[in-house]
Amino acid sequence: MSGAFDQGTIDADLLGRLLDRHGPALALYAAQWTLASEDCVQEAFVELARQRTAPEHVVAWLYRVVKNRALNAARGARRRRDRETRSVADRFATTPQPAFDRDETLDVVQALDQLETTDRELIVMRIWSGLTYEEVAAALSISTSSAHRQYERALEKLRALLESPCSTKNSRSAPN
Amino acid sequence: MFNEKQPLGAELTPELAALQAQLARLQPAPLTLDRDRLMFAAGRAAAESEK
């Protein structure tokens, strides 16, 4: 799926196709760390345009750059004492650009929030960007077999959370 | 062992494949950024890198 972009030069057509195919998932990915998720996506695409040739795994490269930008943005926000007190779930669910189109996804969003960061990263890359295990491995600097194993484990954890009668619902109904 | 070329979910248990399919039906919200502005900035960055 993303392999079509793996080789060659960077041009406007390639950027446009990458943006259409992976932009929303990249913004969702960045939203784990920062509210400025779309800024991170934009900066990553501009940085990609600066490259003379496409990186070997261009989508994995985009994920790495977006993550770095998002972490930097989060650190910058802390430095400015603009501390985020909201959880990752809040960012998924209530950013100005909601992470998903449908309200009924809240349980899934809440369950995702309870996963460890790496598990969430794997799920976003695999499911919403369609990355291969090889590309996920390149993005996270792990082996392909580890990417596969960790992805399965992440899905198992998510399934357990979704099947738990109160794990996601309690956190929603907790008193202020 | 999994096969890298297999389609998404082909190597998973039926339960996990079903969950994966359920998740895949959800779509991240579309970007709201200014696409023209992004492409302009990208074009300028590309031109600067060629100098």
Image (cartoon, coloured by chain):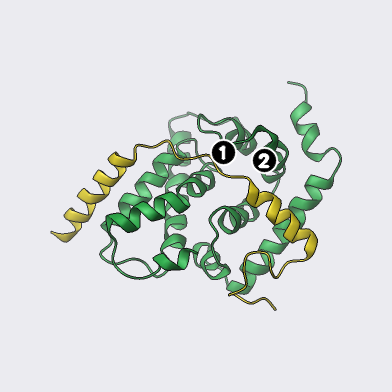
| Gap between marks 1 and 2 measured at Cα | 9 Å
Disc 2 on helix, strand or loop? helix
Give the residue at the far left of this rendering. B51
* Residue drawn at (36%, 67%) of the image: A55
| Residue appearing at x 58%, y 35% in the figure | A91
Q: Chain of mark 2?
A: A
In the image: residue A141, left or right of residue B1: left
Towards the viewer: A91 or B20: B20
Q: Within 10 angstroms of label 1, few (less than 14), some, or many (20 or more) residues?
A: many
Amino acid identity at mark 2:
Val
Q: Earlier in the sequence, mark 1 or mark 2?
A: 1
Parent chain of label 1: A
Quickly name the residue at label 2. Answer: A109
Chain that the image shows in yellow = B
The residue wearing badge 1 is A99
Extreme-right residue of the structure: A165
Q: Colour of chain A?
A: green
Q: Is residue A13 above or below residue B29?
A: below
For the point 24% across and 44% down, the residue is B40
**Labels 1 and 2 share a subunit:** yes
- Quarter of the rendering occupied by the N terminus of chain B: bottom right
Residue A116 visible in the current orientation:
no
